[in-house]
Amino acid sequence: MQPTTFLAAAAVAFSSFVSVAADHRIQFHNRCGSTITPKWLGNGSRDLQSGPTLGPGASGEGWIPEYWTAGRLYGQDGRCPEPDGPNCTLFECSFENRGFNQCNISLVSGFNVGMSFNWIGGDGSCQGGKSCTHGGCPASDAWLAPDSCFGCLSQCNTPGVGIEIVFCP
């Protein structure tokens, strides 16, 4: 066997044992009456990422990595201090533990726009998404201050699962 043929065969055999990490596609929909720009950061980074600026009724997309820890995303409407979005509705996720990946809507630091999320393309074991349309959402729909969550987490362990986020659902 030629050395290059052997190396190619070995690489194919090895790759069949290694799982491939897939990023998570996020679909954004703006149903608000004003412009929203999705902003997010995670993995301990202070490097704020931006999605497309969405006018009323517009949609767009962004991507977050498969392994995303302490991730937070918010709809920038001009009222959210950057980079963390305090005083604003947050979408929080941790995709770090195989077997327990979860997301939630958080009102711990404040509320600026209603938000909902759902999983896209899950394997059937994904829990339903959540929706919070006002600052007085119950603890079953959003994480509340100081530390109150009674069913507000939604879990999905499908690698590369997509997420749909609607601003002003």
Image (tube, helix red, strand yellow):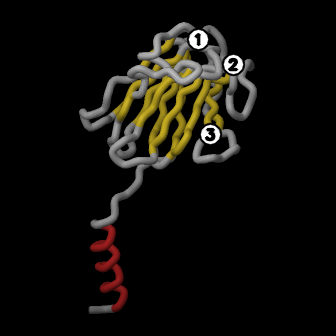
Q: Residues within 10 Å of mark 3 (few under 14, many from 20)?
A: many
N-terminal label among 2 and 3: 3
**Residue 42 in view, yes or no:** yes
Q: Residues within 10 Å of mark 1 (few under 14, many from 20)?
A: many
Q: Nearer the viewer, mark 3 or mark 1?
A: 3
On the image, the x and y values in percent for residue 161 come to 38, 39
Q: Secondary structure at mark 3?
A: strand
Residue marked by disc 1:
32
N-terminal label among 3 and 1: 1
Q: Amino acid at mark 1?
A: Cys
Circle number at residue 77: 2
Report how far apart the C-alphas of labels 2 and 3 lie in the structure. 17 Å
Asked where in the image residue 146 lies, by quadrant, the reply is: top right
On the image, the x and y values in percent for residue 85 come to 68, 27
On the image, the x and y values in percent for residue 43 come to 58, 47
Q: Name the residue rendered at 29%, 79% in the picture.
A: 9
User: Residue 30 or 161: which is nearer the viewer?
Assistant: 161
Residue marked by disc 3:
41
Q: Amino acid at mark 3?
A: Leu
Q: Name the residue rendered at 65%, 39% in the picture.
A: 49
Q: Amino acid at mark 2?
A: Asp
Q: Secondary structure at mark 2?
A: loop
Circle number at residue 134: none
Q: Are marks 3 and 1 in contact (CB under 8 Å)?
A: no
**Residue 36 in view, yes or no:** no
